[in-house]
Image (cartoon, rainbow, N blue to C red):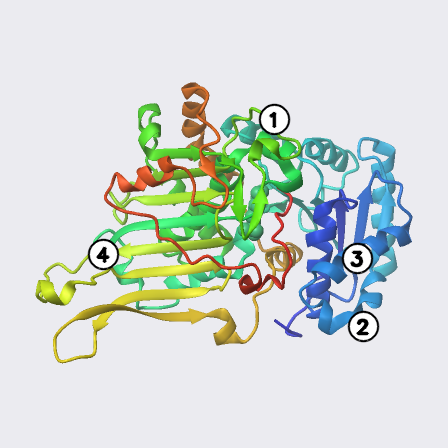
Amino acid sequence: MTTTEFKPEPTTIVIFGAGGDLTWRKLTPALFDLYTDNWLPEHFKILGVDIKPLKEDEFCERVRDGVTKFARTYKENEGKLGDFLIHVDYLCADFKNPQEIESLASRLTDIDQEWDTQANHIFYQATPPEMVETIVQQLAHAHLNRDRKHARIVLEKPFGHDLASAQELNGMLTSAFAESQIYRIDHYLGKETVQNILAFRFANALFEPIWDRRYIDHVQITVAERVGVEHRGAYYEHAGALRDMIQNHLLQILCLVAMEPPVLFEADEIRNRKVDVLHAIRPMSQEQVIHYAARGQYSEGWIQGERVNQYRAEPGVSSNSQTETYAAIKLFIDNWRWQDVPFYLRTGKRLPTKVSIMSIEFRPVPHQTFPATALASWEPNRLIAYMQPREGIHIDFLAKHPGPRMRLSPVNMHFTYQEAFQSSPPEAYETLLLDVILGDQTLFMRDDQVEAAWKVITPILDAWQDQGRPNFPNYTAGTWGPEMGEVLIARDGRSWFEPPVIEDDEAGMGGKKEVAPEG
Ligand code: BG6
């Protein structure tokens, strides 16, 4: 993506929590990639803010290190790093101290004066969630929230831990910023392949006519990770797989798969169609949870020839933790398009491979023309979107097996990004940061979307709470999860689509270990 078509307006990105992992690993490398691909305006500044007493050149050193290790375009643009770092500044400040926020305000005014313009001021919260309220209040106190056109705030999940806390958080945010200034990140929406679900469905005449209950038997969404919780045990203990992944990433994918066609490719139109899906999800009663939801926690096991610890032995995790590292749920969407079509969603840590897929299984033909002998290897038509790795789309169908007799065999057609475009897709954070700079909210979560998603999963969280202590650990690291997860789908006479196990190197990770971003 190299362009000189247009340039966004002058922009200062203030990163709160600039000394942390997210800034180092994701944000500044993504900004470097945008810079080298020529997407950033001539006037832009990255102003890192943190309580850590770093000197400006120490902060620049950290940015340099992150870019060198993680930026997608670093290898071919090594020579541009020095110029990029000219745009990086640091402000050591205690967010709780109003005077120090005043000094941020005057720094921003100075930058605007130097550029002789009113620049965009983007406030990126890369801090732990408990800091958010203080920062928002301080920004409001210093009137940095006032300019509705230029002031924007960016937030990372978690957006609450249940419906009530999400409503409280949204209330606090909207008391200081208008919804049009708030950018809630779900990094899955920045993934090229997740956005491609929209292109695939609504740019082609071929698929949409069969995209409903008349032709589709069921839909599966699997987001599997090979990693455990790594250094994030303390956060994860209060989250678990349902909150950490299903409430946001998997439900967002589901919305894109199930939404009605938008009239326009425009932020609120798309977000309205997505929220319609969430509102149409059939509420689960406490009694249904036992059949419609499964949870698990990993015990020790083997992954890629390495012995790995059980979850309860991970740093920051209680030795009798009840937190689920695997969750699977079955949902129904009560509308004309999807009535009675099950959507099966599952996610887990320490599964055999890292893969995110959406798979649609179609119904059999209404009348079987071919004799039973021709159908010995019959398989349903299936469409599989690989969101990562080996990004692409596969379609499984039946063809006549060569030979004198009529015999049908499953075959497939596939498209991969790598083959079609000869390039790997940009990182999600590149897309999302550019959209914030451009003021495009399409890929960000609106307050009502967040709350509607919590409404879907809160009954499950409540039922699990009431069910008491689960029998954890209940799956071995390196396997596809607990038996209950299999039972959830097997009870309906179906099974999980099992993606191929991909070795790290094959997964395009260049031998780098798969690492979870901050949640
Ligand atoms: C984050 C979760 O939102 O997504 C992590 O908090 C998880 O637990 C990560 O590892 C997965 O993201 P990706 O892009 O690697 O699939």
109 or 197: nearer the eye?
Answer: 197
Considering the numbered disc 4 on the image, is that residue within a helix, a strand or a loop?
A: loop
Q: Which residue is mark 1?
A: 318
Q: Which residue is mark 3?
A: 65
Q: Earlier in the sequence, mark 4 or mark 3?
A: 3
Q: Which residue is mark 4?
A: 215
Give the mark toward the camera: 1 or 3. Answer: 1
Spatial CA distance of label 2 from label 1 is 47 Å
Asked whether residue 331 appears in the rendered view, the answer is no
Whether pointer 1 and pointer 3 mark residues with C-beta atoms closer than 8 Å, the reply is no
**Residue pictured at 30% horizontal, 42% vertical:** 489
The amino acid type found where label 1 is placed reads: Ser
Q: Position of residue 444 (x, y in %)?
A: 55, 49
**Residue pictured at 40% horizontal, 65% vertical:** 393
The amino acid type found where label 2 is placed reads: Gly
Q: Position of residue 68 (x, y in %)?
A: 76, 62
Q: Position of residue 8 (x, y in %)?
A: 68, 63
Q: Quadrant of the C terminus?
A: top right
Whether pointer 3 and pointer 2 mark residues with C-beta atoms closer than 8 Å, the reply is no
Tell me, for residue 79, which label it has, or none: 2
Considering the numbered disc 3 on the image, is that residue within a helix, a strand or a loop?
A: helix
Q: Position of residue 4 (x, y in %)?
A: 67, 74
Give the mark toward the camera: 2 or 1. Answer: 1
The amino acid type found where label 4 is placed reads: Tyr
Q: Earlier in the sequence, mark 2 or mark 1?
A: 2
Spatial CA distance of label 1 from label 3 is 33 Å
279 or 399: nearer the eye?
Answer: 399
* Relative side of 149 to 418, left or right: right
